[in-house]
Amino acid sequence: MKTSIATVSISGDLREKLAAIAAAGFDGVEIFENDFLAFDGTPAEVGRMVRDHGLEITLYQPFRDFEGLPEPQRRRAFDRAERKFDLMQQFGTDLMLVCSNVSPAALGGIDRAAADLRALGERAARRGLRVGYEALAWGRHINDHRDAWEIVRRVDHPNVGLILDSFHTLARRIDVKTIRAIPADRIFIVQLADAPMIDMDPLYWSRHFRNMPGEGDLPVTDFMRAVAATGYDGPLSLEIFNDQFRGGSPKSIALDGRRSLINLMDQVRRAEPATSLNVPDMPDRVGVLGVEFVEFAANEKEGEELAAILSTMGFSLSARHKNRDVTVWRQGGRRSMNIVINTSHEGFAHSSYVVHGTNAYAMGLRVIDSSATVSRARTLGVETFSEQRGPGELFIPAIRGVGGGVIYFVDDALKKVWDLEFEPNISDAQDEAGLTRIDHVAQTMNYGDMLTWLLFYTSIFQTRKLPMVDVVDPGGLVRSQVVESDGGGMRITLNGAEGRKTLAGHFIAESFGSSIQHIAFASDEIFATAAKLKAFGFQPLQISQNYYDDLAARFDLNPEFVDRLRQSNILYDRDDIGEYFQCYSRSFGDGFFFEIVERRNGYRGYGAVNAPFRIAALKRLMPPAGMPGSVSI
């Protein structure tokens, strides 16, 4: 499998782009014309730079408004093509993209277009070059790959072939099965892009909202399955026009791009095992059985404060590490919920505390095979993580998360870690509050990084993404999207902040980076849990009384039932099949908080409708701007 990416897909000048593309592990690069025109150097210098990075130029593009023109525009189009051929030979590439004509002057007719492309193919052949023809979704006369293929078929020239682009086909909802009949040797290159499903003009949609395969809503896998069925084994190239990517990190976007291609082709190989493309061998996406633990980094004082909070929620100090300053707080049995507090003065946890303050820097996921999980992640370009272990300590496979944290993987062979490394503590056991498991974990990041996080989780784990939801914060908008596995073994809400004035943006700024902002624990009977919490001294987040007055009318609820919700500061939602109950802690540190939820009768959501009221309540507890300190639970 030869991977490629167009320079237009990432930010920076041409030198920065090539360095990032090479570092990400791509084999080739498409030179987008504007990137070359803005470069202060000759075509030969560009070619040398590309080769010095270990890359090849897979394509020079685009050559616009060529076929079907009347004279004298037709003659000038051929003159322009010869100039492009000069550049290509100096670059050291042999393939040019010709996109279908959008000029008002263009004349229709497949035979006319075929005649022009045949003449262009003859000129290209004399120079040892090739021409690829692509149907733009907004082409004046040719906007369907089936028509583009018919033109190429009629040209019948070895130096003229077809270029397929997933966006142009899928944006027009063209049946991808029609690709399967195209001979593989007539497809010169395949360009790939995804996009969110938006009803808008295809040109504007394409120029601003494309993203990496797997980050959007288009059936790119189905498109690529059809391509693979032809026997095509040429380059797979990303051509991404995206406003966020233009301002993002070239290195990060390039890494995302290659990860998306490898993940896509792994899915295609599993659906089309006879594919001719050489796909890296790796385990399938990993199923997550549950969250084994969440680990906090803290100092001694803040660790004690966090422990006190957990105690008011029915957690007990269950174990202490034999060699490290690490404690385990547990409720519902060891395979239900393990909250780890690490106050060590060395190692990665301490470094995380120094940078971010008290934070949930790591989580452990229960998986079937921890080694296979890490193997897949490594193949997708994810950095593995390890620390020096002491005597008698287990090595637990782990990777670095996209926010800089750590994700550990615990399988049946490693669950003995609790017995081998920890001394049990039974003297401080207390009554529990009825919390049974971790329902979901919420991670907060800058909105510009959200697609990176989404691709990270969906490419490694057997998960699906839910539609994005806009959460209205008094200080701005927060975009929220859920990634979840079947059965709810892993549920992660990704919250992208667009500005510092939002609660999520404040959390990122104050904690110096993206992180877990809250953990939601599940209860099977939230009213009983609320009563226990009150007895333990838990201080719930106080919800506006106006919320409950409106709730009764909105859902036509019994007044006595609403009073029970009000007395326990429990928020309520329901969908077409079930009900959802939520209550929150007050914030701790720079904005971390806990949530307690109950799902009844298969409720599928996350109470997004209640988020503005939770945010307003949390903001009421924040100190005035410019004042030091924060409100603890």
Image: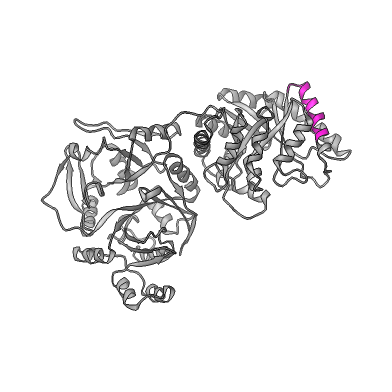
Q: Residue furthest left?
A: 427
Closer to the camera in the image, 74 or 32: 74
Q: Is residue 551 above or below residue 87?
A: below
Q: What residue do we see at 39% from left, 60% from top?
A: 603
Give the quadrant of residue 595.
bottom left
Q: Position of residue 128 (x, y in %)?
A: 73, 21
Give the quadrant of residue 6.
top right
Does the rendering let one see residue 532?
yes
Q: Position of residue 492 (x, y in %)?
A: 39, 50
Image quarter in which the N terminus is found? top right
Image quarter in which the C terminus is found? bottom left
Q: Position of residue 20 (x, y in %)?
A: 53, 33
Give the quadrant of residue 554.
bottom left
- Prevailing SS of the magenta stretch: helix
Residue 141 shown left or right of residue 522 in the figure: right
Q: Is residue 211 above or below residue 48?
A: below
Total marks in image: 0
Residue 190 shown left or right of residue 362 in the figure: right
Q: Is residue 156 magenta?
A: no
Q: Position of residue 413 (x, y in %)?
A: 26, 35
Q: How are the colours assigned in the image? A: one colour
Does the rendering let one see residue 99?
no
Residue 51 shown left or right of residue 152 in the figure: left
Q: Residue furthest right?
A: 71
Closer to the camera in the image, 611 or 79: 611
Q: Is residue 119 magenta?
A: yes
Q: What residue do we see at 37% from left, 48% from top?
A: 490
Q: Is residue 468 above or below residue 220?
A: below
Q: Range of the magenta residues?
A: 114-128
